[in-house]
Amino acid sequence: MELLAEYINKGRTNDGYSCEEWNNGQNGRSVILEKSKCREKIRKIWKENFDSQPQIWFRADGQTAALFFERKLSLPKNKHYLLKTKNQGNWEANGWSCEHKEDSEDPKKIVVSCE
């Protein structure tokens, strides 16, 4: 199954991180990763510099990212185009300051980080 989206949030659990994934065979539902799988994902993506990483990290195509941030951060529909058409940019939603850029591993995806 293809991994459509990945999400890491610092600080929502006692040990500091939660991770979710969306696969193309799950009808848009996310799977919350177990702590060990989450730690493994964090090490793979962030290597060592955990403290300097953003509060929210998300990787997906622009369309999926726009829908995700509409649900999670109340991103207004009139800002969806930023994620769908621009390879990089900065924006704010519901008190969060976010930036996105093209994913270095997959140019069809973007990586979004928010503080």
Image (cartoon, rainbow, N blue to C red):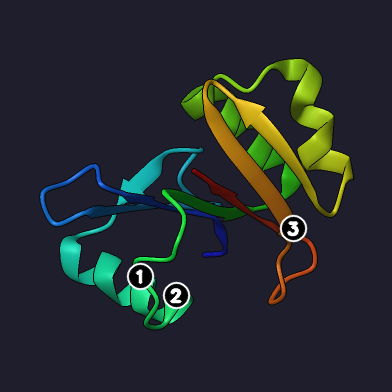
The CA span between labels 2 and 1 is 7 Å
Q: Is residue 97 above or below residue 53?
A: above
Type of residue at label 2? Answer: Trp
Looking at the image, which residue is at 34% across and 48% down? 31
- Give the side of residue 50 with respect to residue 62, left or right: left
Residue at the right extreme of this rendering: 85
Q: Secondary structure at mark 3?
A: strand
Closer to the camera: disc 1 or disc 3?
Answer: 1
Closer to the camera: disc 2 or disc 1?
Answer: 1
Looking at the rendered structure, which numbered label has been put on residue 46?
2
The CA span between labels 3 and 2 is 16 Å
Label 2 with label 1: CB-CB less than 8 Å:
yes
Looking at the image, which residue is at 69% across and 77% down? 105
> Closest to the observer: 89 or 28?
89
Residue carrying label 3: 101
Type of residue at label 3? Answer: Lys
Looking at the rendered structure, which numbered label has been put on residue 50?
1
Image spot of residue 53 (x, y percent): 44, 62
> For residue 77, what is the image quadrant?
top right
Looking at the image, which residue is at 77% across and 40% down? 83
Q: Is residue 114 above or below residue 111?
A: above
Q: Secondary structure at mark 2?
A: helix
Looking at the image, which residue is at 10% across and 49% down? 14
Type of residue at label 1? Answer: Phe
Image spot of residue 98 (x, y percent): 62, 41
Label 1 with label 3: CB-CB less than 8 Å:
no
Image spot of residue 25 (x, y percent): 50, 51
